[in-house]
Structures are given as C-alpha cells and as structure tokens.
C-alpha cells in the first residue's frame, strides 16, 4: 500500500482537529468544505475510506508515536 510521507500526516491530523473544534463538518460553508477536503486527504494518505480509520492509521505512522499511544486521537 502506498503511504504518505510521515512529514505530511501531522499537518493533516492537526488541520482535521483544528477544523473539528469549529464543528465545521455540517453545512456547505467554506470551513465545512475544507474539513471534508482534509478528511479525503487523510483517507487517501492512509489508504482508508473512513476518517476515523484514517486517524488511527495516521497515529501508527506519526513520528514519535508508539503502537499503543493514542495521544494523537485525544482532543487537545
């Protein structure tokens, strides 16, 4: 499977969480479209079809995280 370079994943994950704090997933606002674009990018970058699976896959490929470390999924 093709996997995104590890340097790309932190930015995508950080952007996803920043947008999700704004509760932007609903509606057709510019921010809502952006979060959906980030979700698609995460899915493509991790080879998944669901944003939650993409976040889990990204967690396992982020630099400095162990396989049992779920800190990347915890909201800041």
Image (cartoon, rainbow, N blue to C red):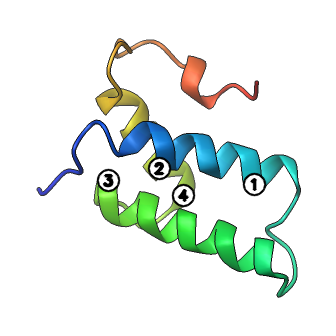
- Image quadrant for the C terminus? top right
Q: Nearer the viewer, mark 1 or mark 2?
A: 1
Q: Residues within 10 Å of mark 2 (few under 14, many from 20)?
A: some
- Image quadrant for the N terminus? bottom left
The answer for how far apart the CA atoms under marks 2 and 4 are is 5 Å
Residue 6 image position (x, y, % from top left): 27, 36
Which of these two is toward me, 51 or 4? 4
Q: Is residue 6 left or right of residue 58?
A: left
The answer for how far apart the CA atoms under marks 3 and 1 are is 19 Å
Q: Nearer the viewer, mark 1 or mark 4?
A: 1
Does label 1 or label 4 sit earlier along the sequence?
A: 1
Write down the residue under mark 1: 19
Residue 19 image position (x, y, % from top left): 75, 54
Residue 5 image position (x, y, % from top left): 21, 44
Q: Residue at x 43, y 65 (%)?
A: 41
The answer for how far apart the CA atoms under marks 1 and 2 are is 18 Å
Write down the residue under mark 4: 51
Write down the residue under mark 2: 53
Picture quadrant of residue 25: bottom right
The answer for how far apart the CA atoms under marks 3 and 2 are is 9 Å
Pointers 3 and 2 in contact (CB under 8 A)? yes
Q: Is residue 24 left or right of residue 70?
A: right
Residue 46's disc is 3
Q: Residues within 10 Å of mark 4 (few under 14, many from 20)?
A: some
Q: Residues within 10 Å of mark 3 (few under 14, many from 20)?
A: many
């Amino acid at each position: 499977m093709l996997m995104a370079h590890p340097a790309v994943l932190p930015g995508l994950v950080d952007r996803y969480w920043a947008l999700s704090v704004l509760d932007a997933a609903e509606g057709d606002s510019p921010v809502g479209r952006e979060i959906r674009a980030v979700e698609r990018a995460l899915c493509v970058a991790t080879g998944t079809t669901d944003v939650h699976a993409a976040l889990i896959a990204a967690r396992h490929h982020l630099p400095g995280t162990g396989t049992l470390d779920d800190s990347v999924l915890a909201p800041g």
